[in-house]
Amino acid sequence: MNPALIVFFVLAALSVIGALSLILQKHPIHSALSLIVVMVSLAGLYLSMGAEFVAAVQIIVYGGAIMVLFVFVIMLLNAGEEEHTDFSKLAKFGGLPLALALTGLLAAAMIHHAGSVPNPANPDALASTSSISMMLFSTFVYPFELTSFLILIAIMGALVLAQREKT
Amino acid sequence: MNAVSSFLAQSGGFWILTMIKIALLLFIVLTVNAYLTWFERKVVALMQSRVGPHRVGPHGLLQPAADGLKFLFKEDVMPGGVDKFVYLLAPFLALTLALASLAVIPFGPNPLPFKFFGHQIDLWITNPDIGLLVLFSITALGVYGVALAGWASNSKYPLLGGLRSSAQMVSYELSMTMSVVGVLLMANSFSLTDIISEQDSSRWGLLGWNIFTLHGGFPQIVGFLCFFISAIAETNRVPFDLPEAESELVAGFHTEYSSFKFAMFFIAEYTSMITVSSLCAILFFGGWNSPFPATPFWQFAHYIPSLILIPFGLWIIYDGVKYETIFGKLILPGIGTAITALGAVLIIFPAVNEYIQGPFWLLSKIFFFLFFYVWARGTLPRLRYDQLMNIGWKLLLPVSIANVIITAGFVLFRGAP
């Protein structure tokens, strides 16, 4: 078997197992740790496709900053083990068939369009740091700036919420 | 999957060579770590007019070995009610991440003159195009070791220490990352070897380093100060060692860890000191570039390694023969002779001398910054927690952002060096 394929399957299995464990773990910290495993194995998948910059940013932003915040909040609230409730009737009778249908639909779509997925001529060149920044600051400059406005609004909202008690 | 298949298609010699390099680097770094504790205790003792460790071996030189043995043979206590998996995971995470960051640090410019099964032997384990980003992503994950250790211990003081340190590390990561952007703008690359070769010192000597950079760009002295202060905070060292403030929190996040698990946190801390010192040397102080220009007038600077090694070796012989034990008869004179002989070899064989220049200057700079760490520990009092947060968010972050903007302007109008 192609060694690159083995790497892919190991990382993919790791991320799926992490995602499952995220849902099934009872303790919030264990769930957060599983989510970190998912993030890091996704970064590994990006790396295996030659997208070094995206992989590093994935770890720095998601694995580092965001998940540290999750863990921090869980620690600060000292959240204990979750209590398990009974499965709701809706989830039992509606959810399972719907989930199976979605899986089937996705699988069918992937098998049907496997041949027609556009294959970039040179993925390494497209994924390099300089080409990503060229795209961000030329072709996609307006969406990029809009996103930063969105983040700015979010920061201001957080500030307002945090300072509400003072006024 | 081009990248990964071309990487996996390397021949067996490459894998063996890399394994040997990793083992060698781990051995060297762990030994240096052990002697760093000795060095720190000695220097702090001298600063406080004490003697420091002096019982075990000459000048206390075997103290690290004694400490290591003690760590190994102490009872490994696991406190009751801990989250076992996370409790055991935390020290492993801390140590693994600290050691992994050494993999991308280049220690010398030229590969060794001989080949290993047709593979050239570079003085680094790997040199990715995103070297600096790899280091930052490892630093970003490094918070977990501390935070999880504090949480898993099921005790109040470690929890407070873990909370403090994760808040501190997250805050200082920002200014640390922003302060190197100026360097990246001038080097136009994330690769550490590219950053070093951009700080060419052949004409201007040390004025070509990023911290002065007279031949283009903008001097990064402010960036360096921001980086070094944030890095000290990031490694939880004095004066930013609030996570382990003894008077308030016993020993902070590793209070409940005993025996070798405690040692793992300790080794992780010292390893990240080495990483930060190498980063300071590489990013701002020219890496392996000599501080002297490469003109004929400065040719004598090539003999500086010998000029340091020979007197040092002779002094070890002179000092060693005073001891009546096996140290005086064999070990210390032996080491002294070896060091003196190395200095003599460098004078006799100019090719060897030429090769040793790069690693020599890089290691001297790393050593200087390690000394600086100890120096800061010996002199500065610990900050209060609100002061720490104020420095991080209200001083270092705005200053490093201003540094990025000014550097970007200079690079735009004056051109990169």
Image (tube, grey):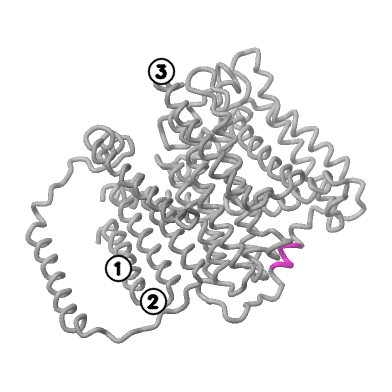
Relative height, residue B127 to residue B352 (above, below): below
Left or right: where B30 falls relative to A13: right
Asked which quadrant contains residue A21, the reply is bottom left
Amino acid residing under circle 2: Gln
Residue matched to label 2: A25
Q: Which residue is mark 1?
A: A16
- x 28%, y 42%: residue: A127
What SS does tag 2 mark? loop
Please give the range of residues in magenta: B67-71
Query: Looking at the picture, do discs 2 and 1 lie on one chain?
Result: yes
Q: Amino acid at mark 1?
A: Val
Look at 57% across and 31% down and name the residue there.
B222
Percent across and percent down for residue B228 are 60, 40
**Residue A127 in the figure: left or right of residue B160:** left
Q: Residue type at mark 3? A: Phe
For label 1, the crowd category at 10 Å Cα-Cα, with few meaning under 14, some 14 to 19 and many 20 or more, is some
Chain letter of the residue carrying label 3: B
Q: Give the CA distance from mark 3 to mark 2.
A: 56 Å
Q: Secondary structure at mark 3?
A: helix
Q: Is disc 3 surrounded by few (<14), some (14 to 19) or many (20+) residues within 10 Å?
A: few
Q: Are marks 2 and 1 in contact (CB under 8 Å)?
A: no
Q: Which residue is mark 3?
A: B413
Q: Nearer the viewer, mark 2 or mark 1?
A: 2
Above or below — where is B85 with respect to A35?
below
The chain that hosts pointer 1 is: A
Where on the picture, by quarter, is residue A83? bottom left
Q: Is residue A98 left or right of residue B410?
A: left
Outermost residue toward the front in this view: A167
